[in-house]
Image (spheres, helix red, strand yellow):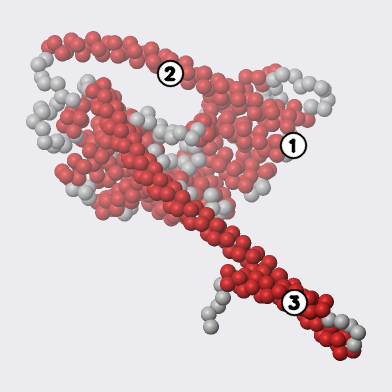
């Protein structure tokens, strides 16, 4: 038996209700026609009344069924309407998805076009810079070569936390290029750059330190490609160029590419120079610093320890370069909260600096600041305060002479102002110690950092008057240092303009006296390196 539909149920209920209505009317007429005089007629009337009551009951139920069926019909109609709306929304959603996919494809194509245009723009800028510097570069190469012998023995120590003079760069979201001296140290350490690479090396360092990566990167890549063709991949010169390119990438925050290049350079140097060569230690240190910048301190620590072992074996345990490596290792451990090891590394580095370089060396003050920072993280405020005071006291003695009752260091003056702040409403302006900030010229970044650190420690201890004294002194010393830098740059700019004018005159004179063909910068560069570029241009 098949199930009845709602329409059939409604129709049946209405038919039954109509039948019951007719039957009720018939019974009503029958009841009206009966006389109630006899007992038999009374009994018939009673039966008819009962039938009418039953008919009324059935009629009521039929009406309820009819109303219920009508309600179900309206509900079903509403459901159909909702289904129709859902189908329409699904279709609109599909249309919107198609439009979104088309828009994404258009955006991707636009981004590719923008990237292509940016690359073309960089290429045009590079070509413009090449034409700009198309004059002879031998003078610049010779001047850079004179300082090469002093730089090549220095260690490529990159501190994971820059000094105070780079605070502005840390706060700035833009990239800050590595200074030329640091850049050269990181590349040259432990391995003497061949003469054929020295010109390119100096150019790349100059461009990278100026943030002109669009020039430095193509130079590195072209030189690396030609070196691999002439010398093979496993050659120390290739490793040197890989180090240069890795450091350029690091300054651009391209850490993954830089790590791949440094690992490749490390493998080459281990094969060609030996696993215990200073150049291997330099590459290990650069790789550890790179991992530290990416927050991979656990991966960086064993690399830094291995570099330390190599330096100790080659240079001796008391060499200043060993102390620099200890500082880097301490910074890595400090980021892992290994404070006992950090204290040991800093204390040992401090002993080496003081014994080999003397107590006035800037590295002594920097290491004391780092050790004090470690103490602060452990809550050892007294030990940290002692180190800060030692740094400021030494700076005061270098600038103003022996300390006595009339010649007090800035921290002592600050504490006296803190003690006397309740004795008078206003402390005197800075009086005799107003020129103390000139002591910062002994080692401006470190002294300024120490002033701010000790001021922050005073604030933490509730010594607000002493803190304000030190902070004001730090601001004044920093302003004076910036003024000195601006003045030196202004003098240097004027001197450069005069030199450029003289050079222009000499260049024009020489042009009239020679008929040699003029070569572009790229040809000069690779001819100077002894790299065959496939051209017939004459060698300089």
Residue 65: x and y in percent read: 68, 71
Q: Earlier in the sequence, mark 1 or mark 2?
A: 1
Pick whichever, 122 or 299, lies toward us: 122
Residue 489 is tagged as 2
Marks 3 and 1, Cα distance to the nearest angstrom?
A: 107 Å
Q: Name the residue rendered at 20%, 30% in the picture.
A: 522
Whether residue 473 is situated above or below residue 39 in the rendered picture? above
Circle 1 residue = 462
Left or right, 51 with respect to 390, comes to: right
Pick whichever, 6 or 226, lies toward us: 6
**Marks 1 & 2, CB-CB < 8 Å contact:** no
**Marks 3 & 1, CB-CB < 8 Å contact:** no
Residue 334: x and y in percent read: 54, 49
Marks 2 and 3, Cα distance to the nearest angstrom?
A: 122 Å
Q: Name the residue rendered at 14%, 26% in the picture.
A: 540
Circle 3 residue = 26
Residue 78: x and y in percent read: 59, 59
Local crowd at mark 2 within 10 Å, few (<14), some, or many (≥20)?
few
Q: Name the residue rendered at 46%, 33% in the picture.
A: 174
Q: Earlier in the sequence, mark 3 or mark 1?
A: 3
Report helix, strand or loop for mark 3. helix
Left or right, 160 with respect to 220, comes to: right
Report helix, strand or loop for mark 1. loop
- Residue positioned most to the bottom: 40
């Amino acid at each position: 038996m098949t199930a009845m539909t709602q329409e059939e149920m409604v129709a049946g209920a209405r038919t039954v209700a109509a039948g019951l209505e007719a039957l009720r009317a018939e019974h009503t007429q029958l009841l009206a026609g009966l006389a109630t005089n006899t007992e038999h007629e009374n009994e018939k009337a009673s039966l008819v009344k009962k039938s009418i009551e039953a008919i009324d009951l059935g009629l009521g139920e039929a009406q309820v069924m009819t109303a219920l069926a009508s309600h179900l019909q309206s509900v079903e109609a509403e459901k159909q309407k909702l289904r129709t709306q859902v189908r329409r929304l699904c279709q609109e959603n599909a249309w919107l998805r198609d439009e979104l996919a088309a828009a994404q494809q258009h955006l991707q194509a636009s981004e590719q076009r923008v990237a292509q245009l940016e690359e073309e723009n960089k290429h045009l800028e590079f070509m413009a810079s090449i034409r700009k510097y198309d004059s002879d570069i031998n003078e610049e190469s010779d001047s850079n070569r004179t300082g090469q012998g002093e730089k090549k023995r220095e260690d490529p120590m990159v501190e994971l936390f820059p000094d105070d003079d780079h605070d502005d760069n840390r706060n700035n979201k833009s990239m800050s290029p590595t200074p030329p001296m640091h850049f050269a140290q990181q590349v040259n350490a432990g391995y003497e750059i061949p003469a054929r690479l020295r010109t390119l090396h100096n150019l790349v360092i100059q461009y990278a330190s100026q943030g002109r990566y669009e020039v430095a990167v193509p130079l590195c890549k072209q030189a690396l490609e030609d070196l691999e063709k002439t010398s093979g991949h496993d050659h120390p010169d290739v490793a040197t160029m890989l180090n240069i390119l890795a450091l350029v990438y690091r300054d651009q925050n391209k850490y993954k590419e830089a790590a791949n290049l440094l690992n490749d350079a490390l493998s080459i140097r281990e094969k060609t120079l030996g696993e215990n060569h200073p150049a291997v230690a330099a590459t290990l240190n650069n790789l550890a610093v790179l991992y530290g910048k990416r927050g991979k301190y656990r991966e960086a620590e064993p690399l830094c320890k291995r570099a330390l072992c190599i330096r100790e074996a080659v240079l001796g345990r008391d060499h200043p370069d060993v102390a620099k490596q200890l500082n880097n290792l301490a910074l890595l451990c400090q980021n892992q909260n290994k404070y006992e090891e950090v204290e040991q590394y800093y204390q040992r580095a401090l002993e080496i600096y003081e014994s080999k370089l003397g107590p006035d060396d800037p590295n002594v003050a920097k290491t004391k600041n780092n050790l004090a920072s470690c103490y602060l993280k452990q809550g050892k405020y007294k030990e940290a305060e002692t180190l800060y005071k030692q740094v400021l006291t030494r700076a005061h003695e270098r600038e103003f002479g022996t300390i006595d009752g009339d010649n007090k260091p800035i921290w002592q003056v600050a504490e006296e102002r803190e003690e006397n702040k309740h004795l008078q409403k206003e402390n005197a302006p800075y009086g005799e110690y107003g020129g103390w900030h000139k002591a910062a010229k002994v080692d401006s970044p470190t002294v300024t950092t120490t002033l701010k650190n000790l001021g922050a420690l005073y604030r933490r201890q509730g010594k607000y008057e002493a803190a304000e004294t030190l902070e004001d002194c730090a601001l004044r010393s920093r302003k004076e240092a910036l003024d000195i830098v601006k003045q030196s740059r202004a003098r240097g700019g004027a001197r450069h303009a005069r030199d450029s004018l003289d050079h222009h005159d000499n260049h024009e004179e020489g042009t009239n006296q020679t008929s040699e063909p003029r070569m572009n910068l790229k040809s000069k560069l690779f001819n100077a390196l002894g790299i065959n570029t496939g051209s017939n241009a004459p060698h300089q």
